[in-house]
Amino acid sequence: MVKISTKLIFAIIALSPAIAFAQAGNVGVNTVNPGSTMDINGSLAANYKAVTTATYNLALSDFHVSYNGSSDAIFGLPPSISGVGNFKGRIYRIKNNTNFKITVNTVAPETINGNGSISVPANQSVELVSTGLTGTNSTWELLSTGTSATGDYIIVKPNAAQSVSTGSDVTFGSVIASNNITYSAGVFNLKAGKTYVLRCQLHATDFSLAGGFFVYEWVDASNNSVLPSSTTGVVDAINNYPATSIGGQPEAYAIYRPTVDTSVKVRLGGAGTAQLNPSIGFMTVTELAGGNGNGGTTIINNNITASNGLTLSGTDVKLGGTLSQPTDIATAGNNLSINGTGKVLVGTNTVPAGAASAKIVIDNGTANGALQIKDGTQQLGYVLTSDANGLATWSSTVTTAFANNWTPYTGALVNPFTGGTGGGGLNTGVQVTIPAKGWYFFRCGIAINSDCNDYFFYINGIGDVWRSYCGSNTAAYMFPRDQNRVLYFAAPGTYTVLAGKTNGVVPASFNGGNPSFYLDFVKFQN
């Protein structure tokens, strides 16, 4: 232990522009037995500075800096130093005495608890300490944040007599003071995570029952359930109840900390009817100091956690964590916008080749069905089509190339024209299999040697695929032999090809040409 005279210390400091002590043991000021490296038995002063400039860089000599400017401000922290001159442990206190915001920036790539900057809101303060680290490490730590802002409160009193009965809500209409609590028709809106003191006093007259009374409690406005901490207030007919009855308890009291934003009110029960006094009584809601860090309370990290797609870095909660449960974002009529030069990637965190200008990338690996769009216009075989403004709907109007992918008929052709009468619905033994709805191009050919008659092949409900008309009263091969058709199919499936003729003539020769019967088709439009 070394005891150094205070006068001697100040004398040495006065004579020396720079001085350093290198010794073992503790140093005491006004104390015989110092218990710490520096033990001061008395007051301690550090530099206090008030600034009004909107841009200020914290200096070597600064400790407490108060901002009294007239606009948002930017404060800059000094760059860290490696080796000689390292100021590990240096503390800066910043107090915002205005209604504006202070942004405290580090020198890139340094951070404050992992963040490049922090904000000091109106009438709040922060305290920072240097970690002595350099580079991308957390070179500054946030010791505490505080505020001198007033907590939430509201006071409401009656503005007129109110007729009440069992199940009535108290609807005092005169708000005489409020801060950050909204109120309407008896309902107070409270915020999650804050702790409130709730009080209500009622006085009533004109009871309809001689021994009439009313009880009242603080309840959840959404379902009328009594708050767990609410006491019960009572108003009764003072001039009528017997001397042995319990007197009134003119206050309902509760301390309440909602876990989600909650609306509360005061609700009455009892018997008969009465009039709430128009000039006596009140309802108040006051935020409890310390309930959420307001009211001059200091919070140090307060065990903040982040989940459900969020990550906590220091005091900064940001997107980028693991989605730990199903999550629904209700926009409630508001727009959800993603702006900037970045991209939205689904199923991957790597921008694939060819997607340099894409804003949305969906990577479903090798599985089908990476994208589903349902707007009521979707149908089998439809494609997504844009209008002049880029609005897309499902449409059947897109034409595809023919390519060389003709599909032939199935089955074995039989002669359908052997009967001695005319008519349709004759069996050909032939079918066609249509893979999807749309327009198809058909081509067909067959040679028939016959006297005058009309011969035809058709698909019931769709149309002809081949037809030849009577062109001679003597035996001749029907012409034209080769024909083309365009047919529309509203649904995929296998369709039977039927035949018909107009009279009882049986052809002298059927399918006797070279080449023989053919029928094939190709889709060309959705």
Image (tube, rainbow, N blue to C red):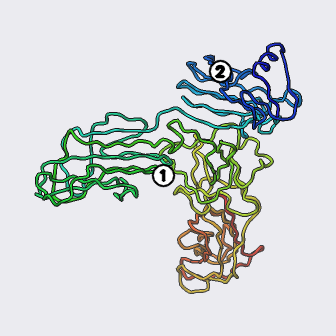
Q: Is residue 426 left or right of residue 88?
A: left
Residue type at mark 1 is Val
Residue topped by disc 2: 48
Badge 2, how many Cα within 10 Å: few under 14, some, many 20+?
few
Residue topped by disc 1: 260
Residue shown at 41% from the left, 50% from the top: 255
Asked which quadrant contains residue 65, the reply is top right
Whichever of callouts 1 and 2 sits on the residue coming sooner in the sequence is 2
**As rendered, which of 327 and 333 lies closer to the eye?**
327
**As rendered, which of 79 and 241 lies closer to the eye?**
241
Query: Which mark identifies residue 350?
Result: none
Residue type at mark 2 is Tyr
Q: Is residue 348 left or right of residue 308?
A: right
Asked which quadrant contains residue 4, the reply is top right
Dot 2: element: strand
Please say if 368 is above or below 317: below
In the picture, the quarter occupied by the C terminus is bottom right
Dot 1: element: loop
Query: Can you give x and y, in whole percent of width and height, for residue 314 in the image?
Result: 69, 43
